[in-house]
Image (cartoon, rainbow, N blue to C red):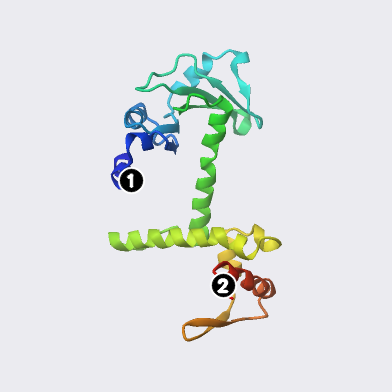
Amino acid sequence: MVQALQNFLAFSPEQRQRVILRTDAGFGSDANINHVLSEHWQVVTKNKGGRRPQAFARQIVATGWYDLGHERWVAAAVDPVTYVRPTQSLVLCWRAAQAQLKYAVVVCSIQDWLPQEVIAYYDDRGACETEIQADKQGLQLEHRRKKRLAAQEMLVLLTDVAHNLLAWMPRWMFPQGALAQYGPLRLTADVLCLPGRLIFERERLIEVQLNELHPHAAVVADAIPSLLSHFGHP
């Protein structure tokens, strides 16, 4: 996957040094980490599990943990794995269901970040997963029903366009009010399904008709001028 990314981007080593690969434990084997580090990428990843996180945690004294809040703690590993480039290896501890403590190892190649900064940056990847799940539900993409590769690639591109439009539309049309809080699922299921007609004259939009019985018709009608002005439509 990383090689395909490099073939596509054709980054120089200097450019790769400014790119951080932020991944979960599925990527974080020692061999994978060494590979991307040797290719000059930066990395923030959860190391693969197994017995290593608990073993590292047992070596940390009680005063070595930094409290992240919400029953989560982080500490520097005492005797971490040595990779081909210098890294930080941090032990993350959190209290799960039934008061059970769980552990993970997070590896970061950025040396001047504080441990809490590393964990905060790693945590941010969760927002990407939330957006992906929202897209699957809102755009009804749980299953891609295209068998040919070209059709799948086109569907991926259309998904990206739809995702961006759904992400930008609240700012363009509903910066305030109840609809500003709607996510992709509610926008597509409750707002964008609003019945209406677009009337064109000489390939130019001249009128938008909406069904006034729809509960969001008035709000959408008030927001349409803002949307059109964003694209330079008088």
Q: Position of residue 175 (x, y in %)?
A: 66, 60
Residue 149 location, quadrant? bottom left
What residue sits right under mark 1 in the picture?
9
Please, what is the three-letter code of the amino acid marked with disc 2?
Cys
Would residue 101 be visible to someone looking at this image? no
In the picture, the quarter occupied by the N terminus is: top left
137 and 216: which is toward the camera: 216
Please, what is the three-letter code of the amino acid marked with disc 1?
Leu
**Vertically, is 8 above or below 41?**
below
Residue 35 location, quadrant? top left
Determine whether the residue tagged by mark 1 lies in a helix, strand or loop: helix
Q: Please give the label number shown on residue 206.
A: none
Q: Please give the label number shown on residue 193.
A: 2
Tell me the residue at 32%/28% (across/down): 38
* Mark 2 and mark 1: Cα distance apart in space: 38 Å
Judged by depth in the image, the label closer to the viewer, 2 or 1, is 1
Tell me the residue at 33%/44% (across/down): 5
Q: Position of residue 133 (x, y in %)?
A: 51, 52
Q: Position of residue 85 (x, y in %)?
A: 37, 23
Q: Residue furthest bottom?
A: 201
**Vertically, is 40 above or below 202?**
above
54 and 136: which is toward the camera: 136
Determine whether the residue tagged by mark 2 lies in a helix, strand or loop: loop
Tell me the residue at 59%/32% (across/down): 96
